[in-house]
Image (cartoon, rainbow, N blue to C red):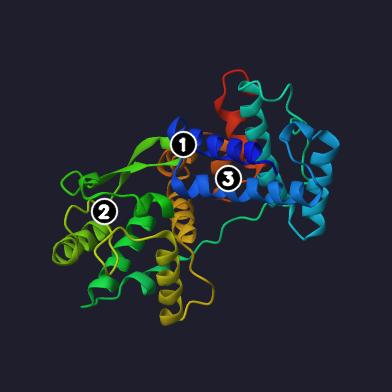
Amino acid sequence: MHTEALQAVDDYLASLAEQRRLSPHTVKGYRRDLEAAVAWCDLHAIEHWRDMDSQQVRNWSAACHRKGLGGRSIQRRLSALRGFFQHLVRCKALPHNPAKDIRAPKSPRRLPHSIDVDRLQRLLDRPTDDWLEQRDLTMMELMYSGGLRLAEVVGLDLADIDLRESQTRVLGKGGKTRVAPVGSRARDALARWLPLRALHVADDESALFINRQGRRIGHRSVQQRLRRWALKQGLETRLHPHALRHSCATHVLESSRDLRAVQELLGHANLGTTQIYTHLDFQHLAQVYDSAHPRARRK
């Protein structure tokens, strides 16, 4: 593509980071999706974004499908392109958004994997003298205790933890801050981790969880360490950070039956997202609505 068109992508990504305060991980995902669109444009000799119409957007979507991408992945790519085109419309670089009404084929939603309580206890109840293993245990305890996302755990600073109040301040999606609970086991794990962190942390590093070099640990490192833990503990399935978050929500819901509380715990903007994560179907939600809403109660 023309240099001007490529610069527009960089400008858009910079605006996402600065104005919408999206995390570097999220911005990287947008870049990856938009670079896929750029590669397709280069293949079809499209030099400017203004040369792309709705039919070409459909053609790109179809090309993604032929490459084996699922409906959700294609929808994510289209969403990135739609947002980028809308940015160009606002900047008056495009007269309209050619991706506005383009939708990807639907694919069935797959529920996140949860771990039963017995296996979680086997995973977490493992004393260790190794400082890196203690770090891993503490991260897992926090993810399970407060339903934290991977990015939220990695982004925690030392100042975000309040052991006296048994809570932590978390920066979630879209730059939204929430307070997550720290259970007794997670609090004990933190009490063991903090002195070890002080011995290995680099000067001026604020991160709660650090790597061997004393700097903030990365997403990929956490994923690899958890995978290693699963193998060592003989878990039958791959251990992903989100499985701990989902297990937290599932176990709290099973005990409390309080969907709204789980929504607050996970930091979901709407109840529908929580419904998916906690295995609830619409029929159950409808029953709650029918029994609770003043204008829905049966006479």
Kind of residue at badge 2: Ala
Please give the residue where the numbered disc 2 appears in the rendered image.
207
Tag 2, which secondary structure?
Answer: loop
Q: Is residue 57 above or below residue 149?
A: above
Residue placed most toward the observer, 240 or 38: 38
> In this rendering, which labeled residue sits more in front, label 2 or label 3?
3
The answer to which of marks 3 and 1 sits earlier in the sequence is: 3
Coordinates of residue 266 in the picture (x, y in percent): 44, 44
Dot 2: within a 10 Å radius of its alpha carbon, few (fewer than 14), some, or many (20 or more) residues? many
- Residue 30: give its label: 3
Kind of residue at badge 1: Gly
- Residue 278: give its label: none
Q: CA distance from mark 2 to mark 1?
A: 20 Å
Quadrant that contains the C terminus: top right
Quadrant that contains the N terminus: top right
Tag 1, which secondary structure?
Answer: helix
The answer to which of marks 2 and 1 sits earlier in the sequence is: 1
Please give the residue where the numbered disc 1 appears in the rendered image.
174
Residue placed most toward the observer, 233 or 194: 194
Q: Residue at x 38, y 49 (%)?
A: 152
Dot 1: within a 10 Å radius of its alpha carbon, few (fewer than 14), some, or many (20 or more) residues? few
Q: Which residue is farthest top? A: 295
Residue contact at pointers 2 and 3, CB within 8 angstroms = no
Q: Residue at x 28, y 66 (%)?
A: 135
Q: CA distance from mark 2 to mark 3?
A: 25 Å
> In this rendering, which labeled residue sits more in front, label 3 or label 1?
3
Tag 3, which secondary structure?
Answer: helix
Q: CA distance from mark 3 to mark 1?
A: 14 Å
